[in-house]
Image (cartoon, rainbow, N blue to C red):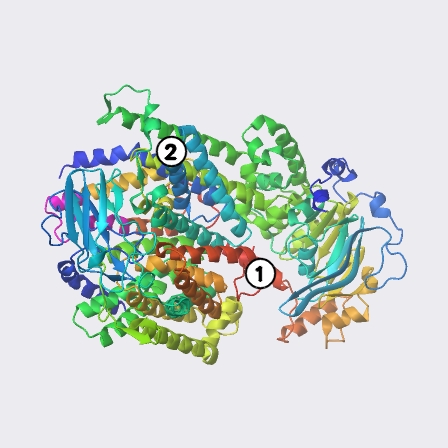
Amino acid sequence: MLAAVAAVFAALLFSAPAVHATTTTPAPSPSGSTSATAEGQDPDGPTNGSEYSDRISGVLRNAGVPLEGVKITATGNGYEGETLTAANGSWSIGVPEQGAFEVELDESTLPDGVALAENQQNPRTVTFAGTSNITTLFLLGEGIVLQQDSFLSTLTERAVAGLSFGMLLALSAVGLSLIFGTTGLTNFSHGEMVTLGAVLAFGFSALGLSAWLALPLAVLGGAAFGYLQDGVLWKPLRRRGTGLVPMMIVSIGLAVAVRYTVLFFFGGAMQQLPGAQSPTLEFGPISIPRNTLISLFVSLAVILIIAVLLLRTRIGKATRAVADNPSLAAASGIDVDRVIRLVWVTGGALAAMGGILWAYYRPGVSFNMGQQILLLIFAGVTLGGLGTVFGALVGSVIVGLFVEISTIWLDADLKYVGALVIMILVLLVRPQGILGRRERIG
Amino acid sequence: MSSQANEPQRGERSGGAHAAEPADGPAANEYMTDSRPITEGAVEPGCRKRDPILVARNVTRTYGGINAVDVAHVEIPRHKITALIGPNGAGKTTLFNLLTGFDTPQSGDWQFEGRDLAGVSAYKVARLGMVRTFQLTKVMGKLTVIENMRLGASSQPGESLWRAFFPPLWRGREREITRQADALLAKFKLDAKRSDYAASLSGGQRKLLEMARALMVNPKLVMLDEPMAGVNPALTQSLLDHIKNLKAEGMTVLFVEHDMHMVRHIADWVIVMAEGKVVAEGPPDVVMKDQAVIDAYLGAHHDVDLGDSEGFEKLEAELEHDPESSVGTEPDGVVGRRIDERKGQA
Amino acid sequence: MDFANIFLGALNEIISPTTAAYALAALGLAVHFGYTGLLNFGQAGFMAVGAYGFAVPILSFNAPLPVAVLIALGASAVFAVILGIPTLRLRADYLAIVTIAAAEIIRYIVTTNSMTAVTGSANGLSAFTGDFYALNPIPPGSYNLGPFAMNERDVWVRIVAWALVIVACLLVWMLIRSPWGRVVKGIREDENAVRALGKNVYAYKMQALILGGLLGSIAGIVFTLPRDAVQPANYGTELTFYLYTALLLGGMSTVLGPVIGAMLFWVLLSLTQGLLYGAIEAGYITFIDTSQAGQVRYILVGVTLMLLMIFRPQGILGNKKELAFA
């Protein structure tokens, strides 16, 4: 098992130079909110001011898909620069000095059916403030202006997307919840288990393996990581009788260490898994990306299998017994350590699977992708009721639906806020979660 | 209601009879020699007392459809030692939790010295003079013994955030508290451990410390949850003496206990619970022979006499072979277990 | 490799205002976690509330310095109360999840484009410390503190930052030795036992949460002063975890622990960076580049946090017997 994991890391290590070679730009996160600057990135164009160190930049995406070849100009202080967006949607215009510039997006160069979202100033004035790089984002609203989609079809599209997102959250959440149920540990390194799934999938396919081989291997790698974590770290800590709060902090240390280890080998760039660009399927007025649908069915199937295993098999019943009362389970002859080891392995595999699906959903693989959804996974688990598997499923689906549907009204860069606020509000009125047993919690 | 509870009558209590320095052994004072009848009228489950300090009516608490507590009426006599007994899972600890505000019942009301306590938070209940200990001893292991004691004291202005910054405002009271604590430690023979961390105490010493700390609150009613559990036999007698002392000092004692032998020694009154209900009550020697009690404790094991400690041991031995029963000091009741779990998780 | 410069650079971190900010924020965490047992994973949120609560009033409506500070502290107290209401009655891990979520909510909100006019979104805010530096009584010039040369601004911000650290340490020290401190230490160990002794546990936890949060927000303000800028990316969850590392380095249940821990954290960070960069430039290490060297430091931070928690949870100053767990 150790050897297998070592081999995986070795594989990643060797694929790393290739990764760096193919990296063109540090792509921003898809949420658009914390978009990385596209410094050093110079799309072709005679007057984009690439010689200047002060830059105005941004990324143009429509519903997560980058737009290429859109013309953007910056004028001010007697200077005029223009550029076209690159294949990943990023653009950057160098300016000779800091100050106020008027930035305009040439709407005639937008693809058909795409327009600026409402309330998006164009042209707009941007002012340098202390930094040498200033980012301005033009938010696009597909269908808001030109496509007259009915509210109902928008709602359906968002709901399907939300369901798919919620189910992939549920994959990770079920693992988290099982681990919490059997060991009491709130595992803050679960996000890194998610990341590892996607990064391994990328690493294996970068080695030239086909997706059919790379993805299952990545899931196996996640399981191995779970096994390793429990064997090397958590089981010895349980033996020492380490308290749950110290263990929680240890899991944070592990999360930081693993996150930066992944960054070390994988680099900071966003990468794509094979088949990340999927066609959109049309169902009457409703259009849904194919990957979203596949992801939905895959997670549904996996969760059904997990449910059957938990409810019907001997080991599943043993797991529930340990979650219910570890000492009683131990007294009735259940090998608690074995059950917990199995839970870690399952949790690792499920998280890796969730990570792969998340990489297709956003789309993209990055070193901090797990961290980005960790809190949503927590929100799902907490909403459903800490420690209940079915609750984790229901809670995650609610979070997924809420995140996606709220984008109809809420700015896209605030969509996670809604879900987190809902979690806090639910804790206020129903601390045991939606499906948790009523008990005195504190 | 809550506004009433906000003003604990500290002055009245600290001036009370029990604040006086007690003698070593139980004194032969009015509380110890009082032979007036405890009840008013017939002795039966839920009977009226001549002078109740605590009265509870229709207190119910269910967990997932199981009636953990369903007490129609119960009164605790003032200035007496009352034992609350019953088989495992009878709801004794749950009743403790409900009465002291650590858990919320589905229904019911109860009065302590005529003051309604339903919905009053646990800390206000304690301030009113109804102080409890826990089945699993809760001493602050990382505080010294004397700090544990000082923590129990009330009316320390330095416990307010603002006044804490101005030592002159609380130093005087701190000296009073320390004197009171030292006196209690001496009485409980813990004075040698004064500066040790409480974690270094033995199980029995922790029980003593927890009891002594509860007395720092100057309670009127002391509720002890299994004070004898896990205490080595050498300390048991001293614990029993301390409980009798509480009565001699004018306090009322309510305690949960499994060991009938202990109960017979010190209790003036015994209340028996089974399946959440009060099934019998009366003076110890009468209750031990009560058919309802025997039924509650024994189920099928009808042939032993509980009143006799040998019989009890025989029962325990029999029950060992019966997987459905258990006798002993396992945490009982859903809440008890939850609290223990939380303790483990905290 | 220029060892002298590397060590000097590391020593310089000891009195840097950023270290002071970390010390203040970690002291706040000590009040939360070390003394009261509150698992606050959102100290970065408190720092962000402090920083934005300070910068926004100055930039948006020209608030005078004291008003801006008061607004920042007030906002921080309100934030603490909002967090405390749903969670202080719940188990410790709920507080951890809610605080980390709340800190992220703050970061998302100050990053959102719809509030660019107020918060500057991802670019953040800058040029709001004019009033602070206008108060500088130190005449312009170059000052030498041992081997370190600094200008009057550097000296001024260091004086203010470390004066705040000293005052905060004194106040916390007084509190912890008072009966109030005794009650919160009791709560850390067993809140039900404290409740059974007639203490309003909820109120104490709330007070501790607000107090530690205020320290976090002061730290947030101090953090912005040398930069004259506030950027949302600085206030991610990692910041909180670095603070925990600093806290655990020094010792979480001691007053000086967070300060020493923050100093150690930055000295070690600077030292590893200097040594790694030096080794790379000198060609001793060839298999990593300088940006990867930066990442190695944070891998070390994570590993340090784990090892500290497992093997020396009391930190270098702490007394294991007084530690709430382990």
Toward the viewer: C62 or B227? Answer: C62
Task: Tell me the distance, in whole angstroms, between the alpha carbons under discs 2 and 1.
Answer: 50 Å
Q: Residue at x 22, y 37 (%)?
A: A99
**Is residue C112 something one can see in this rendering?**
no
Q: Toward which corner of the image does residue B188 lie, by quadrant?
A: top right
Magenta stretch in the rendered image: C276-299
Toward the viewer: A320 or C71? Answer: C71
Whole-percent x, y for residue A229 in the image:
34, 63
Q: Against B157, is C115 above or below?
A: below
Classify mark 1: residues with Cα within 10 Å, few (<14), some (14-19) or many (20+).
some
Q: Against C155, is C277 above or below?
A: below
**Is residue C233 something one can see in this rendering?**
yes
Q: Which subunit holds the residue at mark 2? A: C
Task: Provide the secondary structure element on which disc 2 rests.
Answer: helix
Q: Which residue is mark 2?
A: C58
Whole-percent x, y for residue A304 in the image:
42, 77
Q: Is residue C34 magenta?
A: no
Q: Which residue is mark 1?
A: B338
Q: Is residue C285 magenta?
A: yes
Q: Toward which corner of the image does residue A1 lie, by quadrant?
A: bottom left
Q: Against A105, is A201 above or below?
A: below
Query: Foreground mark, 2 or 1?
Result: 2
**Label 2 close to label 1 by CB (< 8 Å):** no
Q: Residue at x 30, y 75 (%)?
A: A281
Whole-percent x, y for residue A231 in the image:
35, 65
The three-letter amino acid code for the residue at tag 2 is Ile
**Furthest residue in direction bottom, as rendered:** A312
